[in-house]
């Protein structure tokens, strides 16, 4: 994402993500959801259900905010948002790696 955000030169109006891109993003999101599911797998049914509802609600709100921001700001922020998202993912990955190695 960082590489794409820094090197993507798209001046066209038709820069939307295609169907294949949506499939890849859906798979990436599902892998993330799988890791969360493994973490809450030890909860009882009610706790797991509440966690799933909270996660679904937060995901929906953030997605709707993204759609709103995308319509409002369009291509003006697209490459910056891609770089920012990539940096966040790298930071999360480093955090999980360090946490796993150090056992914190």
Image (cartoon, helix red, strand yellow):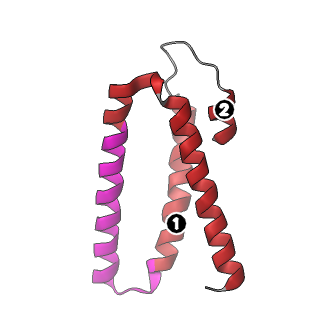
> Label 2, on which residue?
6
Picture layout, residue 44 above or below residue 52 = below
Q: Position of residue 95 (x, y in %)?
A: 62, 69
Q: Which of marks 1 and 2 precedes in the sequence?
A: 2
How would you rate the neighbour count of disc 1 (Cα within 10 Å): few for under 14, some for 14-19, many for 20 or more? few
Q: Are marks 2 and 1 in contact (CB under 8 Å)?
A: no
> Which secondary structure class fits the magenta region best?
helix
Query: Viewer-proximal residue, 57 or 8?
Result: 8
State the residue at coordinates (31%, 82%): 47
Residue 53 at what x, y percent from top left? 29, 66
- Badge 1 marks a residue whose secondary structure is helix
Q: Position of residue 3 (x, y in %)?
A: 70, 37
Taking the spot 30% from the left edge, 74% from the top edge, the residue there is 49
Which of discs 2 and 1 lies nearer the camera? The answer is: 2
- Which of 6/21 is in front? 6
* Whether residue 12 is situated above or below residue 67 in the rendered picture: above
Secondary structure, mark 2, is helix
Residue 46 magenta: yes
Image quarter of the N terminus: top right
Q: Is residue 16 left or right of residue 103?
A: left
Q: Quadrant of the C terminus?
A: bottom right
Residue located beneath label 1 in the image: 34
Residue 80 — which label?
none
Question: In this picture, which residue range is highlighted in magenta?
Answer: 40-66
Locate residue 7: give its quadrant: top right
Asked whether residue 56 is drawn in magenta, I would say yes
> What residue appears at the point 28 percent right and 74 percent down from the top-left corner?
50
Q: Position of residue 52 (x, y in %)?
A: 34, 68
| Inter-mark Cα distance, 2 to 1 | 30 Å
> Which residue ends up furthest to the top in the rendered image?
12
Q: Relative to 18, is 24 above or below?
A: below
């Amino acid at each position: 994402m960082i590489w794409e955000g820094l090197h993507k030169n798209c001046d066209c109006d038709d820069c939307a993500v295609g169907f294949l891109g949506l499939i890849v993003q859906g798979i990436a999101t599902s892998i993330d959801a799988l890791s969360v599911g493994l973490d809450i797998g030890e909860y009882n049914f009610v706790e797991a259900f509440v966690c799933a509802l909270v996660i679904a609600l937060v995901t929906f709100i953030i997605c709707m905010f993204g759609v709103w921001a995308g319509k409002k700001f369009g291509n003006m922020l697209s490459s910056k948002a891609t770089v920012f998202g990539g940096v966040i993912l790298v930071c999360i990955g480093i955090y999980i790696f360090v946490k796993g190695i150090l056992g914190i």
